[in-house]
Amino acid sequence: MTTSAVTVAATAPRAGFLRRRTRSYRLLTVPALVVVGAVIVFPWLFTLYMSAFDWKIGEAAHFVGVANYTGLATNQRFIEAIVHTFYFTLLAVVFPLLLGTAAALIFHREFRGRGFLRAIFTLPMMATPVAVALVWTMMFHPQQGVLNYLLSLVGLPPSLWVYSPTWVIPSLVIVEIWHWTPLVMLIVLGGLAALPTEPYESARLDGASEWQLLRYITLPLIMPFIVVAAVIRTIDAVKAFDTIYVISSGGPGTASETINLYLYLQAFAFYNVGNASAVVVVFFAIIVALALLLLHVRQRARWSA
Amino acid sequence: MSELARDGMLTAASFAGRPARVTLRRLVRRLAFWFAVAVIVSPAILVFLWMLSLSLKSELANLTYPPVFIPDPPTLANYIQVFSQNAMGLYFRNSLIVSGGATLLALVVGIPAGYGIARLQASRTLVLILIARMTPALSFLIPLFMVFQFFGLNNTLTALVVTHLVITVPIVVYVMAGYFETLPRELEEAALIDGGSIISTLRYVALPLARPGIVVATILAFIFSWNNFVFGAVLAGRATRTLPAAVYNVLTFEQLAWGPLAAAAIVVTLPVLLLTIFIQKEIVAGLTHGGVKGA
């Protein structure tokens, strides 16, 4: 009885002190929360609200309930945009993951000029996408473009690149690979830097080859980092806009029109913000679903390992 | 004695039999390694070099086939044309104001927030930031466009600065929260026990230690804001375009030839590339952990 009273007396001021402190730390986050609320949370809520209206900028809005959504479900162009987005995303995730992991394995080794070469390798991801997209547009040019010249050097026939409905998406993926492989490399490199050395020593003593070390030790250990890179890459590929807009604008026809391009046209070419808001909601749902799917894969991978 | 001698002989024998094969194998492996390095690094540098080459050649040289790779003689005419026929100075200034303003505001609200989050160990708050990163930039744009229209702010730099906070605030909060977490708490504890307030502790103890983190947060926020195209393309007017929006909207292919366009592209992206090289090491360290990138 007496002892507990003493403890209470001793901790009470300390508890009050800590509570006050916690409150002060919270207060520090308030300005940022206000900003985030104004420019991030409010737009989300307003988008949900607008998606229930037939709403064109400059005209009166009419409440239509879920009609915008049901309209999208039967909208051939929107469904094709979803297909294009998935096709683009699949390619723009798989190739950067493969190349980025290979690059990380290379840059993980010690060699002369490593820092400098790594710096060069990471430049594309920081370059202004619009500026780079302009240069790629010139490189893709079927007559004067440098890419067709390079193809001719190795004896391949010229390609129409972004002017061909079949090849436009793979061509855009090339730009995406060039742009974002460095980010995958950096994430996987972080994983490699954190690797323990013991498994390698014992495996070498057991006579494992370099390839076996890579296949059975390195790859399983860096898998979590590759999955993180896959999640980030998926989110970014689904959202890709600048390079597609500048290089092909969704063309030829609508051959490379992704959800984001369709969204842009609806909102800022046709000013159909009600419908565009419904597209945003569906789009966001797709992104969240893809991210959750990949994280689920990560869990499964962890269990089976 | 005999054992030692035998050992010595064995090593000598094995050395005598192997050297040629070993060095040849090592040479081949080394060549293969450097070939792999070249394959992986060359696309990155070649695109930039081609960009530079296009910007330094006359229009005639740019349109010849097969392409001319090295400008002979190099000319600055494209740069002169871009600057004299367009308000590049104005666009440059707009970009500086928008990215500088949005970065500065993000530092003002983001550094205290990052500190609070780090000390509260409220990593869940960062989930909000992650969700913000997952949201397509265009989806922020539609509602903000409507609000700016309501207040008559469309086509103003103010609207652009506010919109760019979508990019800069999450980066600053994320980087700073991560950086403050790595700082030791003992000094801050001492300051607090001596009666310092949380604000003064942040100001006089934590902030000076966090300077490298602030530099990285500032540069990353600035770069991703500078690179943003779509906000400027939608919200800016004729006189308030940022550089990326101006390069796309004003200097189209119909109006301009390849040389001037390439020159303009270099003008837009060169500041960013220089900043990247400047904080190369920090980018490697920072991005390996978070995968920070603008909206």
Image (spheres, rainbow, N blue to C red):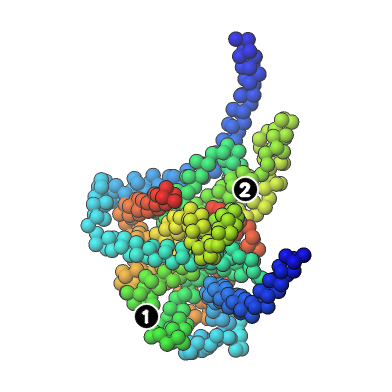
| x and y, in percent, of residue B178 in the image | 59, 47
Q: Where, quadrant-wise, is the N terminus of chain A in this rendering?
A: top right
Q: Residue furthest top?
A: A1
Residue situated furthest left in the rendering? A74
- Subunit ID for the residue under disc 2: B
Q: Could you say which disc has been placed on residue B79 in the image?
A: none
- Residue ID at (37%, 70%): A169
Crowd band around label 2 with a 10 angstrom C-alpha radius: few (<14), some (14–19), many (20+): many
| Host chain of mark 1 | A
Say the numbered circle drawn on residue A160: 1
Choose between A254 and A50: the one closer to the eye. A254
Q: Is residue B235 left or right of residue A104?
A: left
Q: Position of residue B268 (x, y in %)?
A: 56, 69
B273 or A213: nearer the viewer: A213
Residue B40 in the image, given as x and y percentages of width and height: 53, 72
Task: Give the spatial CA distance, label 1 vs label 2.
Answer: 48 Å
- Write the residue at 40% across / 73% down: A171
Q: Residues within 10 Å of mark 1 (few under 14, many from 20)?
A: some
Question: Which residue in the protein does label 2 denote?
Answer: B179
**Rendered residue at 49%/59% (across/down):** A216
Quarter location, residue B277: bottom right
Q: Give x and y (percent) for residue A247.
A: 42, 72
SS label for mark 2? helix
A212 vs A153, nearest the viewer: A212
- The type of residue carrying mark 2 is Tyr
Tag 1 and tag 2, C-beta contact below 8 Å:
no
Q: Is residue A230 visible?
A: yes
